[in-house]
Image: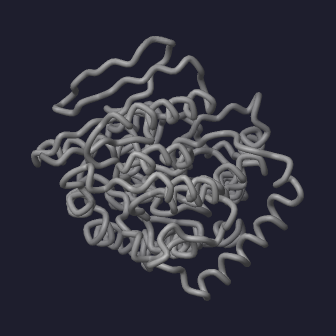
Amino acid sequence: MNKLHILGIRGVPAQHGGFETFAEKLSLFLVKNGWQVTVYCQEDGPSESWETTWEGIRRIHIPVGRSGAAGTVLFDWKVARHALSEQGLFLTLGYNTAIFNLWQRLNGQRNVINMDGIEWRRNKWGAFAKIWFWLNERAGCWIGDHLIADHPKIKDHLSTRVSADKITMIPYGGDEVLNADITWLVPYGIDPGEFSVIIARPEPENSFLEMVRAFSMKRREHKLVVLGNFTPDSNPYHRQIMDAASDEVVFPGAIYDASIVQALRFFSRFYLHGHRVGGTNPSLVEALGAGCAVIAHDNHFNRWVAGPESAYFKDEAEFSSLFERLLADDAAVENMKAASRIAFNERFTWEQVLRDYETLLTRWCPVNVKETMHSGSELTATAKGLFEDPLGDLYPAQAISPEARKVDALEISDLERKQFGSSIAERGPTAHSRCRP
């Protein structure tokens, strides 16, 4: 029987975001297909770990006595240590504490890592956090036996670290929504087709302020529903957004009920997507699955996911004119909605995504764990030199091309000059981001 252990999330059933939802879907799919699946779950408190079973999935509960980022880092450390006694294949979701997976490497355990997005490029992090994420991205590339990228551009980025042969591109998946309960709209005072929706974390890199300000420039006779956890009393950016909003903008807060969120997508005129960095964004995939007409920030991440029939903006002025034109063009909106469903069914159904994962994981399952052991001297040398040669590669036979090294060196130089500056030598590891917004 194939055995898989999932690390890097808070647990199942999903309660916290994209990676948890994916882990739940994958676990249930694999259990149905005869796999033995173990998921590590983060718990509060100082007690000892314990085990439970949920829907055929073995869950190992690891308590930590801290909250927030520190608690998450501590949890990942404890999980990496606990996993040393387990046998089978390991799937780590995210690289934010990838250095801890050196334990699996030293122990000869096979570990496939989903490398998520380019976390260190996000504007919300200071230099301290960016350095931590940058180092762990490097560590994940070298320590992992194989890497998963959820977007072609993420694979291109990772290919400047290791050989492209070490990376498989599998996107995020979603559920197709063919109908929804219209009564969920009543509490918000909105009617089908008479509102547009933003569903994301209210952060600068997600273009909230630009979209809300552009929408509010003039009377639209149309509602804009902005989901998210806004704390204007403690967050200046949230205050800016709410101050810029006209009376046609509705702030219902964060909504976690999937039925309500599906209804808001399904009955919206437009789904507005302002993400500027990342790979395959779960919320955008879910919008395609609901047949939304998408207006998105113009970048290569969004264009690959949403396709050529969606509409794209680069700034506030372009958003405002684009929104005004499409608001009056019913035929264009219907074409956009139809194109979204086609794009979704071509690439992003859970059936396709999970099948691709099972194929990859089956290939990496060790027939005998002892066969995957590496020599301690080799790994000790690797551990010591992990960050000494930032352009090095744990796999000499899969050498990086000179062109890739040149691009990577320029990228590092630009990173250090524009983002980190002299702080690199003065700062160290910090905050931890669990999953992509």
- Colour mapping: one colour
Q: Give left or right: position of 257 versus 382.
A: left
How far across and how far down the image is residue 225, in percent?
54, 45
Q: Give left or right: position of 424 versus 254.
A: right
**Nearer to us in this view, 152 or 204:** 152
Q: Is residue 99 something that shows in the picture?
A: yes
**Nearer to us in this view, 391 or 301:** 391
**Nearer to us in this view, 351 or 219:** 351
Q: Is residue 147 above or below residue 160?
A: above
- The residue shown at (46%, 51%) is 376
**Nearer to us in this view, 409 or 357:** 409
- The residue shown at (33%, 34%) is 85
Q: Is residue 352 something that shows in the picture?
A: no
The residue lying furthest to the bottom in this view is 403
Q: Is residue 45 above or below residue 244?
A: above
Q: Give left or right: position of 141 versus 316.
A: left
How far across and how far down the image is residue 180, in percent?
28, 45
